[in-house]
Image (cartoon, helix red, strand yellow):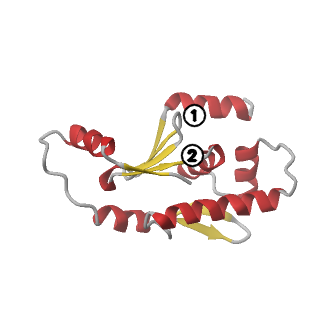
Amino acid sequence: MNLEQYWQQLTERQQLHYHGMLTVNCVQNYLTVPSRRCLIRLTEPQKRLFACLILGTTAKGALQHKIWFDRPQPNPGDSYHQLLQQVRRLLSKQGLGGLLLINPGSGVRLNPAVLVRYVAAAPVITSFNNPARAISHSLAEAKCYDN
């Protein structure tokens, strides 16, 4: 299977979940933290980065391969580092600054401890008896953050 087919299959899955606290919508390119009503719009490379991290790909070379399909970049190292800095800035704006851990020379991973603290600080939604309805209502009122 080539990488374009790989991403097409992921898009067909529609959503990827990380420990029930973080969701990447692969169709509409959103990152959501449902308990905090946080909805962040992602670019295609940003979405691919989060998808890779959720699915366990963390090595720099593997990330570059999957995100850019091994297509020649003017300077692949710079593109990779620019993407990481964009994502870190985007997460910092939402109070998730430490979520993306960069391990020089080896890659990147998500820091679940930051996400746990972020989710724990969320107000408890008690206006609905049905938790699924409460979350969908919460997301309907969520603020959308652009890059």
Q: Secondary structure at mark 1?
A: helix
Residue bearing the label numbered 2: 51
Residue 59 image position (x, y, % from top left): 69, 58
Residue visible at 76% across and 47% down? 65
Residue 22 image position (x, y, % from top left): 42, 51
> What crowding class fits label 1: few (fewer than 14 Cα within 10 Å), some (14-19), or many (20 or more)?
some
Residue bearing the label numbered 1: 10
So how many labels did they put on this image?
2
Q: Are marks 1 and 2 in contact (CB under 8 Å)?
A: yes
Q: Quadrant of residue 103?
A: bottom right
Residue visible at 63% across and 68% down? 102
Residue 39 image position (x, y, % from top left): 42, 49
Residue visible at 32% across and 41% down? 140
Asked whether 93 or 33 is in front, the reply is 93
Asked whether 102 or 47 is in front, the reply is 47
Tell me the tag on residue 108.
Answer: none
State left or right for residue 73 relative to residue 99. Answer: right
Residue visible at 33% across and 44% down? 139
- Mark 1 is on which residue type? Leu
Asked whether 106 or 82 is in front, the reply is 82
User: Is residue 92 among the parts visible in the rendering?
Assistant: yes
State left or right for residue 26 relative to residue 108. Answer: left
Asked whether 103 or 140 is in front, the reply is 140
- Mark 2 is on which residue type? Ala
* Position of the N terminus by quadrant: top right
